């Protein structure tokens, strides 16, 4: 009996571990099955989440998508690139066409001009004054061409047409053709680029052009060479120009040797990240309408100060300009020494509004004792970068007869065509 | 870009691709501003008749904010 019990005990002892292992295995299997179920459930959840997210994130697993637009009101708003309107592919449509743009310049005036002045382009009630068509293109890797046609009510003329060689050695830039001279600050600008409707008195009186030409100034056919001059922190550019010698009433060539010359040096520097300053000096010499023996010399100095707080760059800015011109015109009896200047201030009130004022004073080139003075107040509204509405009150006191003209001018500028850089 | 124009919103790399190296670069670390100067003939279309003037590009935090004639 005892032996039997001992045998049973031995058998039981040998079986119980196996039974324990079986129980543990079953437990493990059960746990594994439970874990498998949990993994399947998690996989299903992830699949569902991925399917519900936007495609851009789903295809950009590394998070390198577009930079978010700044929402901080103190930072400048970045304008989005303009959308193409035409459905025609650009690359195929204009392979051989230049960039074409047209600027319309509708100008009108009201008020009492007291008969105007023989040196100031009189304005009718309303006129489409000097609309401009531009054609610009790269010719080859070495040159580009620019044409600007002035379209007035009396016809079309080439305002400017020149070729620019941009890859000359020594950093030289050579232009050849008909162009506006680089004398002073404003002479090179076209009317529609000015911060006022008209040009300052000094431009008419001393840089003269045709008395009825609103786009007056020195403009002629010739050559222009310019070069940047290393000057440390300053941006310095020197320009030398040679022209035929025919420009309105200021220069007249009686023979081929009566050419005119223009020299200009300007220096630019950033004073701070908000402000910059530009200074310029100019000289011009040519023969006048009295003949080859009579010379007219012009000296000019200009200064431009700009302030634009960068964090509010498209909402606030200030621009102050002044230009002084001296004229030495050899006459039959004596040399007429005349002086004229303008000073202006423009303040950007808001994103689309600019207010400004300008003071003019100028002797007359042919009668230096006669002095004209004027004051203008200007208000400009820019609905977009392609249009502009401007009004200007102009009060001018003419030195001959002490006549006073008090006028209200208005202007509508509108632009069509391919666009390049714009002032914001 | 393929037409050679620059517009506000471009970054410095895009402007460099279109216009190339500027003649002058100025950096203002305090305001994270870069000012690039180009001679006017660099622009594909000189809509503001910059002529022999120049163009000034202002980048704030690497984004072109202001394009103005010099």
Image (cartoon, coloured by chain):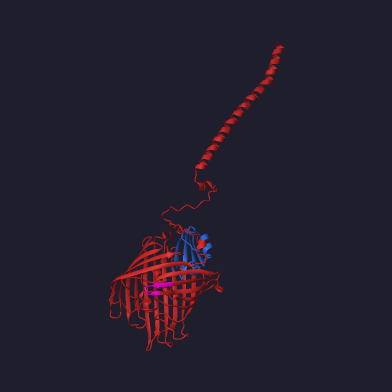
Chain colours: A red, B blue
- Dividing the picture into quarters, in which one does residue A400 lie? bottom left
Answer with the quarter of the image where residue A352 lies: bottom left
Q: Is A152 contained in the magenta span?
A: yes
Q: Nearer the viewer, residue A422 or A315?
A: A422
Q: Is residue A319 left or right of residue B15?
A: left
Of A349 and A114, the residue lying toward us: A114
From the top left corner, tell me how far across and down residue A158 is, in percent: 44, 74
Residue A245 sits above or below residue A138 on the image: below
Q: Front-most of A341 and A135? A: A135
Q: Position of residue A392 (x, y in %)?
A: 33, 68
A24 to A216, vertically: above or below:
above
| Residue A151 in sight in this render | yes
Horizontal and vertical percent for residue A271? Answer: 45, 66
Task: Identify which residue is drawn at 52% across, 60% down.
Answer: B14
Query: Does A164 appear in magenta?
Result: no
Which residue is drawn at the image coordinates 40% and 81% (left, top)? A250
Using the image, determine if residue A97 lies above or below residue A281.
above
Q: Main secondary structure of the magenta part?
A: strand
Q: Which residues are magenta?
A: A149-155
Quadrant position of residue A77: bottom left
**Image-based side of A100 in relation to A412, left or right:** right
Q: Is residue B1 visible?
A: no
Residue name at image x 70 percent, y 10 percent: A1
């Amino acid at each position: 009996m005892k032996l039997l019990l001992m045998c049973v005990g031995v058998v039981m002892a040998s079986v119980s571990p196996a039974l324990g292992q079986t129980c543990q295995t079953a437990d493990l299997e059960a746990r594994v099955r439970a874990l498998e179920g949990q993994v399947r459930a998690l996989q299903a959840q992830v699949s569902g989440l991925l399917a519900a997210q936007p495609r851009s994130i789903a295809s950009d697993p590394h998070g390198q998508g577009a930079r978010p637009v700044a929402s901080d009101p103190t930072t400048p708003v970045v304008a989005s690139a303009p959308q193409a309107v035409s459905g025609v592919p650009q690359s195929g449509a204009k392979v051989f066409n230049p960039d074409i743009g047209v600027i319309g310049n509708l100008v009108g005036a009201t008020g009492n001009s007291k008969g105007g002045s023989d040196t100031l382009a009189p304005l009718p009630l309303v006129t489409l004054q000097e609309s401009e068509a531009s054609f610009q293109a790269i010719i080859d890797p070495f040159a580009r061409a620019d044409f600007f046609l002035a379209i007035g009510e009396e016809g079309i003329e080439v305002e400017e047409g020149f070729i620019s060689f941009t890859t000359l050695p020594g950093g030289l830039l050579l232009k050849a053709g008909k162009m506006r001279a680089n004398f002073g600050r404003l002479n090179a600008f076209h009317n529609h680029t000015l911060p006022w409707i008209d040009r300052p008195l000094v431009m008419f009186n001393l840089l003269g052009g045709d008395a009825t030409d609103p786009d007056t100034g020195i403009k002629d056919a010739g050559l222009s060479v310019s070069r940047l001059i290393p000057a440390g922190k300053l941006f310095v550019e020197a320009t030398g120009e040679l022209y035929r010698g025919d420009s309105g009433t200021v220069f007249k060539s009686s023979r081929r040797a009566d050419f005119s010359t223009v020299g200009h040096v300007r220096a630019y520097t950033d004073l701070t990240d908000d402000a910059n300053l530009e200074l310029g000096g100019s000289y011009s010499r040519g023969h006048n309408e009295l003949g080859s023996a009579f010379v007219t010399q012009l000296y000019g100095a200009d200064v431009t100060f700009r302030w634009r707080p960068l964090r509010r760059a498209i909402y606030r800015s200030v621009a102050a300009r002044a230009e002084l011109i001296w004229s030495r015109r050899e006459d039959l009896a004596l040399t007429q020494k005349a002086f004229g200047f303008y000073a202006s201030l423009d303040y950007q009130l808001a994103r689309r509004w600019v207010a400004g004022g300008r003071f003019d004073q100028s002797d007359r080139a042919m009668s230096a004792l006669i002095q004209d003075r004027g004051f203008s107040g200007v208000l400009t509204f820019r609905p977009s970068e392609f249009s502009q509405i401007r009004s200007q009150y102009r009060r001018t006191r003419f030195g001959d007869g002490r006549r006073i003209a008090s006028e209200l001018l208005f202007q509508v500028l509108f632009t069509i065509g391919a666009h390049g850089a714009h002032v914001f | 870009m393929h037409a050679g124009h620059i517009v506000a919103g471009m970054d410095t790399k895009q402007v460099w691709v279109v216009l190339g190296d500027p003649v002058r670069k100025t950096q203002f670390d305090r305001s994270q501003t870069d000012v690039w100067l180009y001679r006017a003939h660099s622009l594909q279309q000189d809509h503001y008749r910059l002529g022999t003037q120049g163009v000034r590009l202002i980048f704030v935090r690497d984004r072109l904010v202001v394009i103005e004639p010099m």
